[in-house]
Image (cartoon, rainbow, N blue to C red):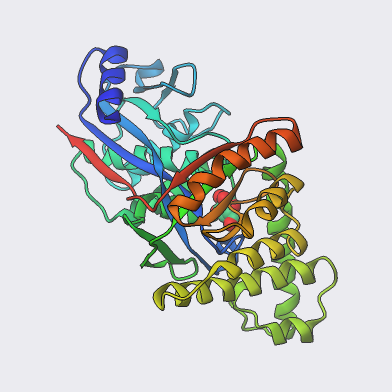
Amino acid sequence: MSVHRVSELFALAYGYRPRAVASAPGRVNLIGEHTDYNGGAVLPIAIAQRTWVAIGSSGGGGEHGRLRSRAVSRERGEAGEWCAGDCRASGVWWDYVAGSLEQAHALGAARDGRDVAVVSDVPMGAGLSSSAALEVATVLAALAADRVEPPLRDVALAAHRAESEYVGVACGIMDQFASALCADGHALLLHCDSRVALDVPFPRTVLIVDTATPRSLRLSAYGTRRSECDAALAFLRSAEPSLASLAQATPELLERAHLPAPLDRRARHVVSETARVAAMVEALEARRPFGALLTTSHMSLRDDYECSTPELDWVVDRSVARAGVDGARLTGAGWGGCAIVVGEEAGLEMLGPELLQGFATAWGRDARVWRTTPHVGARIDLQG
Ligand code: GLA
């Protein structure tokens, strides 16, 4: 459906048909939070909402004979224009597109003036990886237009470089890998140190609850936590020089090392969360209950990692004891954004409206909810 919408937007903006369309989804992480940049494992699913990117060659000349690229978006506001090969981000939405086109070029796509159109139903600013979806879809569309077809993991890495090196957000690799590699009906077990990824069947439904908190705090607090984890690792290495990453520390090592506060709590979260990911995968494979792991993860994020908010805690508290609910926790970076409630479709269908109403009464503003099952990751939708 949105393949047509994005093709129409493209034709309207540029007066010709796109050469390729690719799409990529947003994600929620089931468990394994703040482990990706610590060398641990994560377990995200792709959500139903996607971003579609249509692409063609503008052939347009820019200043000093440099090729000009252009981007339009149905949701993101004003149209953008820049010179292909410009290596500076300027704080606009099309930085994600410009950075991704540069990375597609590094993977073998021509460095050309490009025309790009974007249509998306991934909620923006909610912590559902709308930027990763845009980056992954752009890299894949640019490559598809030139009939270059690298493995999707290379597309994920290129999209991650666009975010970290071009846009300048020092995130881990989870979001781009989830958006690129997730399989329908499955969660993606990604070992972030080796980047080995495995599909794990996930036959449950997820209710996503956006607590609608502004994003700025999330970015700055995220940087602080990363520095604290680096400091904890350096500290632990003075006791255990061969320690490869914080996620590989054992509870015994933490005990022995006497980390100063708050590094002790940050490290305890990373180490216990890494164990919970393994336990969750085992439980899913053996079809055993796993809900308590989700809820324990939330408590660890709240108390040890200190990245929850009263609103997120409220959603978790209201959801966990309900019929048909396995467990609940905040998802993504935290400090606002979304919580997930995992369970049976029917129970979550009833819970959604109740949470919306209760949230508005308790917090004086509106939350948003969506139900999802695990969807497919990035794909090429049209190749001319
Ligand atoms: C954000 C980042 C991810 C990851 C999570 C926390 O979503 O983009 O790389 O670090 O926070 O798990």
Write down the quadrant of residue 82 in the picture: top left
- What residue occupies the far left of the structure in this picture? 384
- Which percent across, then down, holds residue 18? 22, 25
Write down the quadrant of residue 14 in the picture: top left
Visible in this render: residue 265?
A: yes
Residue 73 shown left or right of residue 294 in the figure: left
Count the labels in the image: 0
Q: In this orientation, which residue lies closer to the viewer: 83 or 210?
A: 210
Residue at (71%, 87%) from the top-left corner?
A: 252
Residue at (38%, 61%) from the top-left corner?
A: 203
Residue 240 shown left or right of residue 44 in the figure: right
- Which percent across, then down, holds residue 31? 55, 63
Residue 289 shown left or right of residue 148 in the figure: right
Establish if 345 lies above or below 20. below
Residue at (48%, 16%) from the top-left corner?
A: 78
Q: Quadrant of the image for the N terminus?
A: top left
Visible in this render: residue 173?
A: no
- Which percent across, then down, holds residue 206? 48, 52
Residue at (35%, 57%) from the top-left corner?
A: 153
Establish if 351 lies above or below 259. above
Q: Quadrant of the image for the C terminus?
A: top left
Establish if 107 lies above or below 291. above
- Which percent across, then down, holds residue 221? 73, 48
